[in-house]
Amino acid sequence: MTSALLPQTLALAWLALAVVLEVLGSCLLKLSDGMRRRLPGLAGLALVIGAFAALAQAIRGMDLSVAYAVWGGAGLVITAIIGALVFGQRIRPTGWTGIALVLVGVVALKLL
């Protein structure tokens, strides 16, 4: 790996961490039952704060628009799929269309 690739690779690693923390944090917030269960709620909040901290590191090495779009888009898609698989939430056909549009938008933003 060349030294020129290192900052980009590090930024992508921070971005991946931000996505994972955001998705896990959101799942814990769901499990908190509107913060009625404090332990999962507080852990969820801590993970979401950690996600923003990791995102802040990611944008040091990449464009804000790309980092935020990937973070938000990936978080949305992964959270929707987890919602369906783990929490039994139904994704309607229009929801799948929306997910596809988010993915197309993120790819278009990265390519343009």
Image: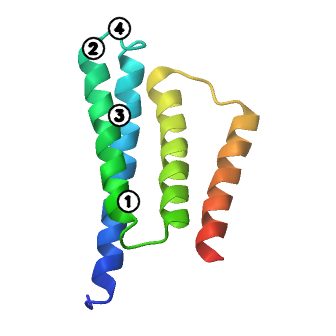
User: Label 3, label 1: how many angstroms apart (C-alpha)?
Assistant: 15 Å
Question: Could you tell me residue 79's position as x and y percent?
Answer: 48, 37
Quarter-wise, where is residue 99 in the image? top right
Q: How is the image coloured?
A: rainbow
Which residue ends up furthest to the right in the rendered image? 94
Label 1 element class:
helix
Q: Gap between marks 2 and 4, in whole Å?
A: 6 Å
Marks 2/4 in contact by CB < 8 Å: the verdict is yes
Quick one: SS at disc 2?
A: helix
In the picture, the quarter occupied by the N terminus is bottom left
Q: Is residue 84 above or below residue 106?
A: above
- Three-letter residue code for mark 1: Leu
Separation of residues labelled 3 and 2 (CA atoms): 13 Å
Instruction: Report which residue position mark 1 lands on.
Output: 15
Q: Are marks 2 and 1 in contact (CB under 8 Å)?
A: no
Residue under the point 65% across and 52% down: 102
Q: Secondary structure at mark 4?
A: loop
Which residue sits at x=28%, y=81%?
6
Q: Which disc is residue 38 wearing?
A: 2
Q: Quadrant of residue 76?
A: top right
Depicted 77 relative to depicted 55: above or below: above
Q: Residues within 10 Å of mark 4 (few under 14, many from 20)?
A: few
Amino acid at pointer 3: Gly
**Residue 25's mark?**
3
Q: Residues within 10 Å of mark 1 (few under 14, many from 20)?
A: many
Identify which residue, 94 or 31, lies in the foreground.
31
Residue 20 relative to residue 80: left or right: left
